[in-house]
Image (cartoon, grey):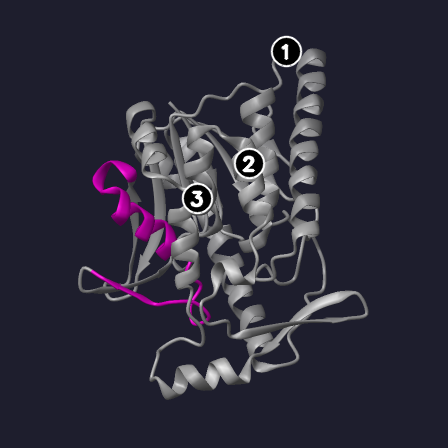
Amino acid sequence: MKALVISGGGSKGAFAGGVAQYLIEQQGKNYDMFLGTSTGSLLIPHLATQDIGKLYDIYTHVNQHSIFSINPFVVKKKKGREYVSINYFNTMLQFIKKRRTFGESKALRRHIKKHFTKDEFNRIRDTKEDVVVTVANLSKNRTEYKSINDYSYEEFCDWIWISCNYIPFMSLVKKNGFDYADGGLGCVIPIREAIKRGATEVDAIVLESEDLDYNKVLGKNPFSLMISLFGHLLDQVEKGDIAIGKLAAEHRNVKLNLYYTPSKLTENSLIFNKSLMEKWWQEGYHYAESKHEKGQSMDESDPLNSITTAH
């Protein structure tokens, strides 16, 4: 049973879309299971329907207005570089309302329901083994995995949305008496979960570069510094997820193919820039293409050679 797993990574999800497009359309991968966290949760339902064109249009047109009903950021440009500053009015409004987060992402919930239809939901349940999104149950201090097979259309749309809620900048959601938020707070890339659910081959797209040495640019205001700090913490969670996933794959004799970004795409994945996301999508496609061409040439030179990781 084949599984496609996509990590969290905000706007960098466009790169994952390009990789997935190549694997599905050119490599003929027919996945039984799809698992995702955060931005990965937005991608996997559309990949499960194999409507790549629709996904490309939706994803590359996402912007701040598609996500935030109350946006805590102001995106500014300086010397050709985009960075975030505090939206003082919206932030103070949240404090006055005694909200627990700096912003609200109810617009994203509407966006998900608008573009992921009930017919598509039913088609996935009829044709695929499973689609699973990762959420963090903060009340119970645990990571939970929500399957499309266990919920109604409305409920599953809620879980997709919750998986993307990067607190304290987006909505903290109360559901079934518990507080939920972005799944990346507990598991950035659910490789082990795919294996536990019976996957015998896993293609995992990691929206971060592997062992790339660079100096991180820390924020110059409290918000951007907080984003940098959260990014650092999630990077550590991701490394742990991959290490555990590799051990699980080795223990159960599962073929694990890892696809990393070949370079650092952005310092702030909460900035959604159409031209950049279109560029990253194409980079993802060509990156996967080059890795498979390289793998084929190596296999031809040595029939015993097995490529399990794309660097």
- Tell me which numbered mark, 3 or 1, is placed earlier along the sequence: 3
Residue at screen point 59% across, 76% down: 225
Q: Decide which of 214, 174 is in the foreground and name it.
A: 174
- Between disc 3 and disc 1, the foreground one is 3
**Element assignment for label 3:** helix
The answer to whether one can see residue 262 in this image is no
Residue 120 located left or right of residue 50? left
- Between disc 2 and disc 3, the foreground one is 3
Q: Quadrant of the C terminus?
A: top right
Which amino acid, by three-letter code, is at mark 3?
His
Q: Decide which of 243, 82 is in the foreground and name it.
A: 82
Q: For the residues marked 2 and 1, what is the alpha-carbon distance in whole angstroms?
A: 21 Å
In this view, 188 is above or below 307: below
Q: Quadrant of the N terminus?
A: top left
Which residue in the protein does label 3 denote? Answer: 115
Which amino acid, by three-letter code, is at mark 1?
Pro
Residue 11: image location, x then y, percent: 58, 53
In this view, 26 is above or below 170: above
Which amino acid, by three-letter code, is at mark 2?
Leu
Examine the image and state in which quarter residue 306 appears.
top right
The numbered dot on residue 258 is 2
**Element assignment for label 1:** loop
Q: For the residues marked 3 and 1, what is the alpha-carbon distance in whole angstroms?
A: 45 Å
- Tell me which numbered mark, 2 or 1, is placed earlier along the sequence: 2
Which residue in the protein does label 1 denote? Answer: 303
- Tell me which numbered mark, 2 or 3, is placed earlier along the sequence: 3
- Magenta stretch in the rendered image: 148-175
Q: Few, some or many C-alpha atoms within 10 Å of disc 1 (few <14, some 14-19, many ≥20)? A: few
Residue 112: image location, x then y, percent: 41, 49
Residue 177 covered by magenta stretch: no
Q: For the residues marked 2 and 3, what is the alpha-carbon distance in whole angstroms?
A: 29 Å
